[in-house]
Image (spheres, grey):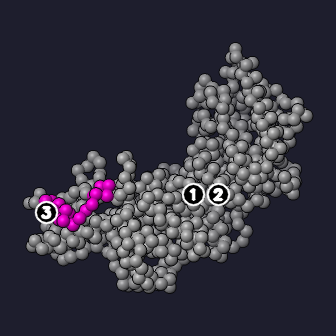
Amino acid sequence: MSKRMDTGNAACALAVKAANVDFIAAYPITPQTTISEKLADYAAAGELSGVYLPVESEHSVMSAVAAASAAGSRTFTATSSQGLLYMHEILHFAAGGRLPVVMVNVNRAVCAPWCLYADHQDSVSQRDTGWLQFHCASHQEIYDTVFLAYKVAEKVRIPAMINYDGFLLSHSMLPFDTLDQETINRFLPPYRPDWKLHPQWGGTFGNVAAAAEYSAYRNTLAEDTLKAADVIEEEARAYKDLTGRWHGGMIDVQGPQDSDVFLMSMGSMSAEMSLVAEALQAQGIKAANLKVRVYRPFPGAALRQALPQNAKLLVFDRNLAYGHEGGALLMEARSVFYDSGKAVKIAGASVGIGGVDLPAAMLTEKALALLEGLK
Amino acid sequence: MNEAIKSVKLADMPDYELVKSGTGGCAGCPSPMGLRIVGKALGPNSIMVMTPSCAVASIGVMPKSCYDVPVLNVCFASAGASAAGVSMSLDAQLKSGELTGEKPTVFTWVGDGGTYDIGFQGISAAAERNDDFIHFCYNNEAYSNTGVQRSGATPKYATTTTTPAGKSAQKKNVPLLMLEQRVAYVATASLAYPQDFYRKVMKAKSIKGFKYIELHAPCGPGWKFASSDTVTLGRLAVKSGAWLLWEGEHGKLTLNTPTKPLAEGKMPLTELEDYLKAQGRFSHVMKSPQKDAVIDEMKAEIRREMDFMLGREKL
């Protein structure tokens, strides 16, 4: 283990280099680009265990990594914003094909108009492609989540997307700790699938299916995505036992577990939100920060368990759910507590769209206004 | 041109059948006919990458497949990148010792829609990177799988369901673009010349890097001819000059027989009209008062193409 001072993208590339990745395909897009560049440097220096394919578009990126995954490789790519949207068709293919691809999406607003800065519209709009979605709030969490994502994705055979906010995390310099290779290998051994697209194994992949078989495949994916929540909790605990590092399982509640008010968000905002919880506590309000670490599967069970009776849940979305009053997290939070037997009052707001700055003081004011509205 | 790979008689080709009985293709479909030859040349240690096409629609419903080798059925624009992904994954696993033995031949089997149009970017990029696989385009000159709509490979004047009055634009020439990308190997082929096709597939198999082979694939339902006439149409296309047989390595072009003697005037061209009237998609031309002018225009285009290729061969 060693301490580093570097960008979020550098933390990501370091973790990918250490994760025994066999195949990387990449296409540049701001603010992800420096991950692809750093991995190309590692490949050129002979420091990567796998191969690196620089392709000509994000659609081809995902076509290449999905195919390489089917052929038996542990695969990686990174993208942002329009790049993620351009992959959309193959995101469905990778999930339907149960290919445990791991991809980093450095969150960035989508056009029009063009905007380079962070919000979650890109990843939230890929919600129903069948991918697991992690969100990170720190460089340390980026580094650690790479190993967790591979472990979980390969165990449940569902691709995983690791999200973190463009520039706020991707380009800022912060300290983080790496792990020694032996520890990494113990948590994440090399990938050895029990089937490969290869004449030694035989079989076809992605064949035409009749309705009954097709629906069985897709219903199984839906069930297994829900079950992945338990695997994520289990593997996050195993990672903690091995390394002492903890960023939460499906969610992470920071502050009194019996709080009256819970401040829910995901991404870098949830780091800022711990200051908001402190500010509310200073005003005599018992408040806790509630970080959503996993957006897909949605942490329904974890939320129902974490929130006490009569709690107030304030939801801060960095996305817009067009045609709905409030963002995606707010919509799903309400759905989780409907008929849950728990009286939880819920209010929320969409903030920080297009990278609008979210200082704690502003978020505190917003939280107080939302609380006022719940009275 | 490397002549190490000699012509093999049909009877001397391997018994191996890549296409099993039970393919859902139409009677006389050129796709399984072509794939049979491909299978004999490449053998069972192969991996096929396919994109939406008649060849996928006729594979059989899961869990059945009419193809003997592992198949990856990817999305429409994915052939170039996905074949590259499979090939490089094999390279990585062979290097690390995860896999042992001879590297399977990775090849795509894609129509003209997946090659000329929606998939062109990915294939052109794989060619530029010199990724190690063979791209096969079986060119039936239309989107036959979706019911015969125009493609970038549909010749001028041909009717399709989206060019009911005949196509007004010239077709693209993707093999020529591949030649000018100086790929490791590029060839055109015809079902009427299976020995030539077999030799070209064997040649492609022997070369590391990006290989492109385009098979002219007359489509009975699409072009409106009897299912027994697929090979006849293919032969008429070559002998009339509507389809040229050639191959190239790293930009060096060689015209093949009979295209070369036809182009050089050492062998008489079959009348283009014989080719056009043997199918229904040009019937409006044959009935038109402008018939002679249109056929003259087509012949002039063939002559231009032949002169161009004769000159290009000298470079």
Task: Give amino acid for label 1.
Answer: Val
Question: What secondary structure is marked by label 3?
Answer: helix
Both on one chain, marks 2 and 3?
Answer: no
C-beta proximity under 8 Å, tags 2 and 1? yes
Question: What secondary structure is marked by label 2?
Answer: helix
From the top left corner, tell me how far across and down residue B279 is, in percent.
72, 28
Is A351 positioned to the left or the right of B259 in the image? left
Is A234 positioned to the left or the right of B306 in the image? left
Task: Give amino acid for label 3.
Answer: Leu
Work out which quarter of the rendered image holds the C terminus of chain A and state it.
Answer: bottom left
Rendered image: mark on residue B129: 2
Crowding at mark 1 (Cα within 10 Å: few <14, some 14-19, many 20+):
many
From the top left corner, tell me how far across and down residue A195 is, in percent.
58, 68
Identify the residue position indicated by label 3 in the image.
A368
Identify the residue position indicated by label 1 in the image.
A55
Task: Give amino acid for label 2.
Answer: Arg
Rendered image: mark on residue B88: none
Cα–Cα gap, marks 2 and 1 = 8 Å
- Majority SS type along the magenta span: helix
Crowding at mark 2 (Cα within 10 Å: few <14, some 14-19, many 20+):
some
At horizontal 38% and vertical 62% (from top left) the residue drawn is: A166
Chain part drawn in magenta: A352-371
Chain letter for the residue marked with disc 1 in the picture: A
Residue closest to the far right: B266
Q: Quadrant of residue B232?
A: top right
Cα–Cα gap, marks 1 and 3 = 49 Å
- In the displayed structure, A341 sits above or below A57; it is below
